[in-house]
Image (cartoon, helix red, strand yellow):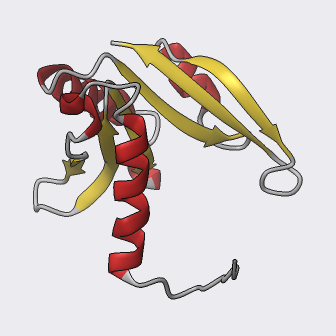
Amino acid sequence: MNIEVTSTPQKEDLKFISEGIKKYNQKYIPDDVVFEEDAKFAVFAKSENGEIQGGIRATGFWNYCIIELLWLSEDTRGLGVGSELVAAAEKYALEKGFQYIRTETLSFQARPFYEKLGFKVYGELPDYPKGHTTYCLVKKL
């Protein structure tokens, strides 16, 4: 057996690994769940002239929606825009049939914000990144 590490994996090799885990998962999860496509979406907050002032990048699969990133410009923070973005993401996720929404945030970022919106911490990664903590949060939709 040869073990190889690469920082430039071939697209078809990555697909081969994905297909392998899907085939394994079929033993435990129904086919319609194993083979469902990821749902990628974004939510934007734009100024009157169309400039992006904030947004969410999200994806979902199985029954979970994942907020990958949430960003707000300095001018929009504290105005409720973040709450509106999350509400729009949750509405979209519900319409797509997701039952939960989860995210991660760093100790200097938005844990209180997410908790105010009903998210609960289910895990912590201390010293990630060094000197900080990553919090994993989830909310039932």
- Pick the residue in front: 137 or 74: 137
**Quadrant in which residue 4 is drawn:** bottom right
Determine the image quadrant of residue 43. top left
Q: Nearer the viewer, residue 66 or 50?
A: 66
Total labels drawn: 0
Judged left or right of residue 139, residue 56 is left
Name which residue lies at 70% across and 26% down.
Answer: 123
Q: Position of residue 69 (x, y in %)?
A: 44, 50
Residue 56 or residue 61, whichever sits in front: 61
- Residue at position x 40%, y 84% in the image: 10
On screen, residue 107 versus residue 44, left or right, reads: right
Look at 50% across and 35% down and name the residue there: 103
User: Residue at position x 36%, y 46% from top?
Assistant: 22
Relative image position of residue 13 (x, y in whole percent): 41, 76
Q: Is residue 17 above or below residue 70?
A: below
Q: Residue furthest front?
A: 1
